[in-house]
Image (tube, rainbow, N blue to C red):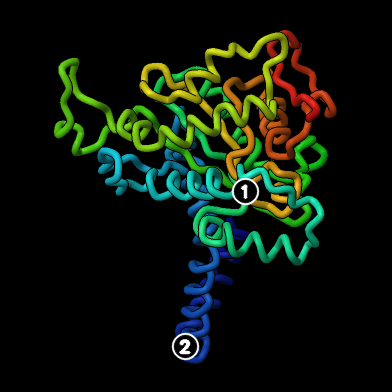
Amino acid sequence: MIILKSIGAFFAKIWRWIKETAWVQPLLIVGAIFAVIFSIPYITSWVSSWSEASEGAFYTTYQVSLEGEDTANAKISKADALTSMIEEATLNHAYDGVDRSKMSKDALAAYQNETYGQIIKEYGEKFFFVYVADNNSTASDFEEGFRFLRDNWNKSNLNLAAHDDKKLDFKIHVINSSEKSANDDDFEITLGKISAFNRYLTNYTELFNVAGPWLFEHMPYVLNNSLAEDTFNHFAIAENVTEFPVPTVCLVDFTLEAIADGRAGLSEVLFNCFGTTANEKAENLLAMWNHTDPYSVKNTWTDTSKREYRVAR
């Protein structure tokens, strides 16, 4: 009891000294303000970790909305803003068949800035471009892998080191095919309403029509023993929301290496997530990011009959 009284008396003396010493008070106030300012990022991160705990919440964090999605030639949604840039960059430049492998690094950098500068500025030099749907088990598997990859980005001890020639951050943009738009009631057909995602697919039919065959021909990520060619066909045709493969994970790459290697733009596509642990799922996604063969890194999942792999070009 005597010890507690002594401690209390000590703090009481400090408090009296602070109250009686005028110059200390503004210093403490300023210090408290800076403490709050510097703690904001940690508080935000802490709160974000709460909000991402539920299934699908991770995707919501990175979602580009279909709100306002209209018919062809009236592209006004946030999903349009991103996809129209990908379409223009991919179809008009990345898939042009020009060999740029002999270009110097300076020449590649100049070409990159001139051709892809705007989309890089707004969305990133390299990013996952993902289509998901509500209540989808495979999308949940991908979500676990994406979250682990983001939280452990570039940790080589977990086999999650990106192979880019400069430091790039984890980046992902998501479109939810289940999202409803306020203007859905404005679009009717004899069989019912046309969803926002259906209108979106109509707007970007050319992108999928061209990208699908290009991806299949270049064989980035082909399902071992049979990819289920119908999956690629539904991705390429992209006519109906009920047939479009969801989830679909794409990689969009505008790095100098991708440009020189002829794989810029919409360069990879993946329809299934493999691995039993979050780390293994993240490794599979990182292999896609690195344009490498998951067989070349240590993988422990056992369902080799369904594992995806890169075929040498």
Q: Position of residue 287 (x, y in %)?
A: 73, 33
Q: Horizontal placement of 187 versus 199: left or right?
A: left
Q: Nearer the viewer, residue 172 or 211?
A: 211
The kind of residue on which mark 1 rests is Lys
Q: Which residue is mark 2?
A: 20
Q: Tell me which residue sits at (49%, 24%) in the image.
A: 235
Q: Position of residue 106 (x, y in %)?
A: 76, 66
Neighbour tally class for label 2: few under 14, some 14-19, many 20 plus, Cα within 10 Å: few
Q: Tell me which residue sits at (47%, 19%) in the image.
A: 234
Q: CA distance from mark 2 to mark 1?
A: 59 Å
Q: How many marks?
A: 2
Q: Nearer the viewer, residue 117 or 216?
A: 216
SS of the residue under disc 2: helix
- Which of disc 1 and disc 2 is earlier in sequence? 2
Q: Tell me which residue sits at (30%, 49%) in the image.
A: 76
The kind of residue on which mark 2 rests is Glu
Q: Position of residue 72 (x, y in %)?
A: 29, 39
Q: Which residue is mark 1?
A: 126
Asked whether residue 248 is in view, the answer is yes
Closer mark to the observer between disc 2 and disc 1: 1
Establish if 298 lies above or below 33.
above
Neighbour tally class for label 1: few under 14, some 14-19, many 20 plus, Cα within 10 Å: many
Establish if 230 lies above or below 263.
above
**Quadrant in which the C terminus appears:** top right
Q: Nearer the viewer, residue 149 or 1?
A: 149
Q: Position of residue 130 (x, y in %)?
A: 51, 34
Question: Which of the 4 image quadrants contains residue 142?
Answer: top right
Q: Tell me which residue sits at (58%, 40%) in the image.
A: 266
Asked whether residue 170 is in view, the answer is no
Question: Which of the 4 image quadrants contains residue 228?
Answer: top right
**Quadrant in which the N terminus appears:** bottom right
SS of the residue under disc 1: strand
